[in-house]
Image (spheres, grey):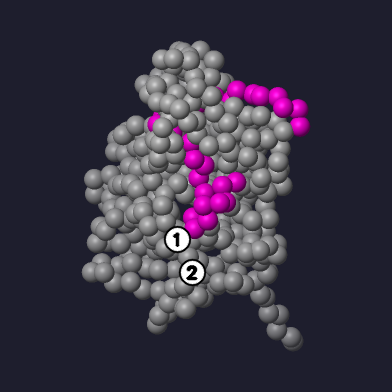
Amino acid sequence: MGLLLLSAPPISRGDSEIVVAIRYLQAKGTSHSHLYLYREDGKLLRQLTNDNSGQDSDPIFASDGGTIVFTREKPNDTREFWSIDPRGTKLKKLDAAPDWYSAAKSSPYFTSGGEEEAPSSSPTPAQEESASPAATGESAEQPEHSSVTALDAVTDATDHPPEIIKAPDGSGEIFWRKGKEGEGPEEVLNWVMWFRDSKSGQETQIGRLRGFPSFEPLHIKGNKDQKFLFEGPLRLTFFSCHLDSTNGDTVEAFDFNKRKLIQLSPNYATPVPLPGEPAFLTLTENRYVTIPGSTKTANCSYIERWAANLKESCDNYEAYLRFHGVSSDEVVEGFTREEYEKQLRENKEKGHECYGQPEVRYARKGSAAICYGASMYRPGKTPAVITIRNGAD
């Protein structure tokens, strides 16, 4: 009688996959960072690690997608390197990090900072939670962004408007006109965005960048000339704005297709291009997220994927609540329908404040979490691996 051998069915690798180091914050005890593998469309495929002896961070796919190497940080500054395959098998402790892993840097991302500037404020923890994956409590570093103000972009704002921004495809240009006297938060910053269509010459008033803005678009780190994300139907440029000391900075995308300013997050969001795809990732910061099962809050970070339409809404109260993480029409300071409608009325002349929704958030719904690095494997695309490292490059 023959022996029938059963083997596990092969995993299809036609779809892109992303591995994310996520630390889900708990109401009590110590929370730990583990690796989670998602399909690009947001389906959780499996949790890859569950060891609570340390904190797992910086997962990176090998170039062929067959192996994931990551760091496990333990108490007393102990750092280990491990590998695992996307099935969640072949977990192996390594004698040392592979050369390719040590040399890997974060993939190109949009920043407003100078090349040598230190990262600005990173997500900070609730009381006993450390913002670092290390048990030592050292501070976490995220892809850098700094508060660049309008005064950095224009030395004499009274006489010289911010620089004209020309679309790389020649479709038109962004330019600026002074607003009505007394309307701006600071008279010297009272510049209103307009768009001029190259073919028709038609000029459209877009509105003001919120807060204390930078009129200089974000650029790809290391390449200040690359200020646009044009990929198929995706046609964007990004601006940073400082809201206030509570909410920190935010990022607004100007959509050349819709000719609208669209806010990506109530707080900061670092855009990471996906070359060859009409989509992009963000490392999104959300401040004061409630830790489930408690009244504590924490400053959190998530990896999100955005489609070309940005799912923008300019006058939908329910979408506005979702944008701010409020799941129902409850009375929350600053989010009541009356306050929202008052805001719309005040913004009528300068254009509605539009806000976007990501297509996917790679994390458990309703969770308070901190991301400690991510890596996407994209079979058949160049580059095949997109990396977001936890530490500064």
Q: Which residues are magenta?
A: 199-228
Quick check: is 213 in the magenta stretch?
yes
- Location of residue 135 by image quarter: bottom left
Residue 258 visible? The answer is yes
Secondary structure mostly seen in magenta is loop
Residue at 67% across / 52% down in the picture? 277
User: Distance of mark 1 from mark 2, alpha carbons?
Assistant: 9 Å
The disc placed on residue 43 is: none
Earlier in the chain: of badge 1 and badge 2, it is: 2
Residue at 62% across / 72% down in the picture? 64
Name the residue beneath numbered marker 2.
104
Q: Quadrant of the N terminus?
A: bottom right
Residue at 45% across / 61% down in the picture? 389
User: Residue 370, how many percent across, how many down?
Assistant: 39, 50
Using the image as rendered, state which of residue 53 and residue 255 is in the foreground: 255
Q: In the rendered view, would you say 236 is above or below 32?
A: above
Q: Quadrant of the C terminus?
A: bottom left
Amino acid at dot 1: Arg
Residue at 37% across / 57% down in the picture? 116
The disc placed on residue 389 is: 1
Q: In the rendered view, would you say 44 is above or below 62?
A: above
Q: On the picture, is 375 further left or further right than 167?
A: left
Q: In the rendered view, would you say 166 is above or below 17?
A: above
Amino acid at dot 2: Ala
Label 2 element class: loop
- Location of residue 182 by image quarter: top left
